[in-house]
Amino acid sequence: MNVHEIEEYRKFTAPAELHKAVNTLKGMVAGITTDRKISEDEVNELSHWCLCHANLIDRHPFKELIPLIQSAYEDEILTSDEADDIVWLCNNFVSDSNYYDLVTSSIQFLSGMIHGILADGEITDDEIHALRSWIQMNSYLSGCYPFDEIESILISILEDDVITQEEREMLKAFLSNFVDLKSSYNLNDRELEELKEKYSIGGICAICENMQIADNEICFTGQSLKASRKEIAQIITDLGGIFKNSPTNKTRYLVVGKAGNPCWAFSCYGRKVEDAVRRRKEGQLLTIVDEEDFWDAVEDVK
């Protein structure tokens, strides 16, 4: 597409572009202010984000929003009051618009919040705990990519109440997957790629407390600690579920066997897991489940 064709196309996508941008900005400001400290790097990141969205300046609400942001960071200090004003204006627009449903809007906010947390290139304890609190308060997003993955990695990091530098780097590498680096001033693509290679972070099991077997298609991968694949297939069928050997467009759960996979939370696994992650990215409601949650669900219905 040439520039003229892109502008013509944007006439039809303007409502979606506007709504996504406002939701993302709202999350970004929340992420930047979540540790109650606003650095020069974070101000520059917000400024750069505005420049990347300058094409929206003549459209509501950006004709009010971008000047407000520019005014807020012109002294290179973004105060809490200024941040609150930006969030308030974002909320004012989003609450009056029904272009996207709640789930999509919330995932857009989450993407912005992650960008805000990463804006200065560092992740503090306060930011990690704030992200965990947001995840806990928005559990209705369970099953939506990348909610389950983020929830699981946070639980793994916080389970011993100690956050190591290695865990911070791992989290930074993982969260960077959900930030548009083209709209970032501070985030170094090369550094992030090196971190991703270092930690080889792949798909992650959801914390699935309410797995429903009946009427759902279930796939199993890996080796089970408790039963053969044939026995598992029979259990699923007996409980009203549908067993499949590989993920399909109707698969609701991919259960990952525990045997031989002690480091599941931060490791890459085989073809079925990659297929399931791809399907989740494309919008399929598919939850990747640890084997223990599967057996808990079996016990609940017996």
Image (tube, rainbow, N blue to C red):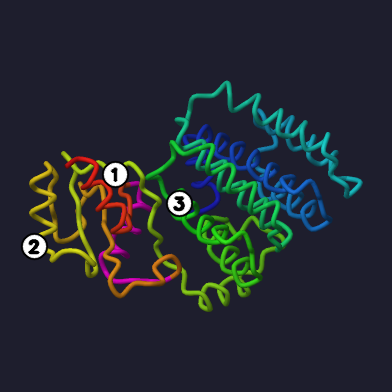
The label number, if any, that marks residue 230 in the structure image: 2
Q: Main secondary structure of the magenta part?
A: helix
Q: Label 1: few (<14), some or many (≥20) within 10 Å? A: some
Q: Amino acid at mark 3?
A: Pro
Where is residue 263 shown, x and y percent of the image? 41, 71
Q: Is residue 200 magenta?
A: no
Which type of secondary structure does the marked residue at label 3 adopt? loop
Which element is circle 2 on? helix
Q: Three-letter amino acid code at disc 1?
A: Met
First along the sequence among labels 2 and 1: 1
Give the residue drawn at x 22%, y 46%: 299
| Residue indicated by mark 3 | 146
Taking the image as shown, residue 203 lies to the left or right of residue 89, namely: left
Whether residue 270 sits left or right of residue 94 in the image: it is left
Res 176 quadrant in image: bottom right
Q: Which residue is mark 1?
A: 211
Residue type, numbered disc 2: Lys
- Residue 145, compared with residue 262, is above or below; it is above
The region drawn magenta spans 267-283
Residue 57's disc number = none
